[in-house]
Image (cartoon, grey):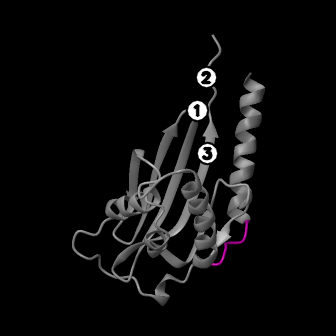
């Protein structure tokens, strides 16, 4: 048992060192639209509420209005196994998803996503908003990285993953 812990610890240290030595990625040029002061009442929580409402109504334009032009996303979809880069590619992914949802349901509220365990961390320029949604054995985990750009909170990265938790057998 002690050997396993020690090996795990050394593996963890090795991963951290490798990550520290890896070249940094190209930063998103947020200054192109200019960082600015938030409009009164504009918060990451308000942007999250807008995002959830856009998802529930499958409103593509409202969804995309929340994303920065150079945003990126990881979707839990087989059609998009790698990072999706740029607003137009994200638009295509959401359009495909919304079209599939609308095919099987009546609207205008096609889904009933209710985020749980919402956590907002950050400052007045950048925030990380995470939450999950539980539906049967599937827990959908979501993280939004947001930046204050042009006086509005914009999503610069979305990370979406799902995990299936099977019930314990009795």
Q: Position of residue 86 (x, y in %)?
A: 61, 77
Give the spatial CA distance, label 3 vs label 1: 10 Å
Outermost residue on the left side: it is 40
Residue drawn 65% across and 78% down? 26
Residue drawn 59% across and 67% down? 95
Q: How many labels sit on residues? A: 3
Secondary structure mostly seen in magenta is loop
Which residue is tagged 2? Answer: 167
Q: Position of residue 59 (x, y in %)?
A: 46, 66
Are discs 2 and 1 less than 8 Å apart at CB? Answer: yes
Q: Which comes before the other along the chain, label 3 or label 1?
A: 1
Residues drawn in magenta: 22-26
Give the spatial CA distance, label 2 vs label 3: 16 Å
The image shows residue 165, relative to residue 103, as above or below, that is above
Which residue is tagged 1? Answer: 137
Relative to 13, 167 lies left or right: left
Residue 121, label in figure: none
Q: Residues within 10 Å of mark 3 (few under 14, many from 20)?
A: some
Q: Position of residue 60 (x, y in %)?
A: 50, 69
């Amino acid at each position: 048992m002690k050997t396993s812990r020690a090996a795990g610890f050394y593996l963890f240290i090795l991963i951290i060192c490798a990550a520290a030595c890896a070249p940094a990625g190209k930063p998103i040029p947020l200054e192109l639209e200019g960082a600015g002061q938030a409009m009164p009442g504009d918060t990451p929580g308000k942007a999250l509420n807008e995002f959830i409402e856009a998802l529930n109504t499958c409103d593509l334009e409202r969804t995309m209005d929340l994303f920065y032009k150079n945003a990126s996303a990881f979707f839990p979809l087989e059609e998009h196994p790698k990072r999706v880069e740029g607003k137009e590619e994200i638009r295509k992914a959401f359009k495909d998803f919304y079209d599939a949802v609308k095919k099987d349901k009546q609207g205008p509220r096609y889904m009933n996503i209710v985020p749980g365990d919402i956590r907002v961390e950050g400052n007045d320029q950048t925030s990380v908003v995470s939450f999950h949604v539980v539906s049967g054995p599937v827990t959908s985990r979501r993280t939004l990285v947001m930046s204050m750009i042009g006086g509005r909170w914009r999503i610069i990265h979305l990370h979406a993953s799902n995990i299936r938790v099977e019930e314990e057998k009795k």
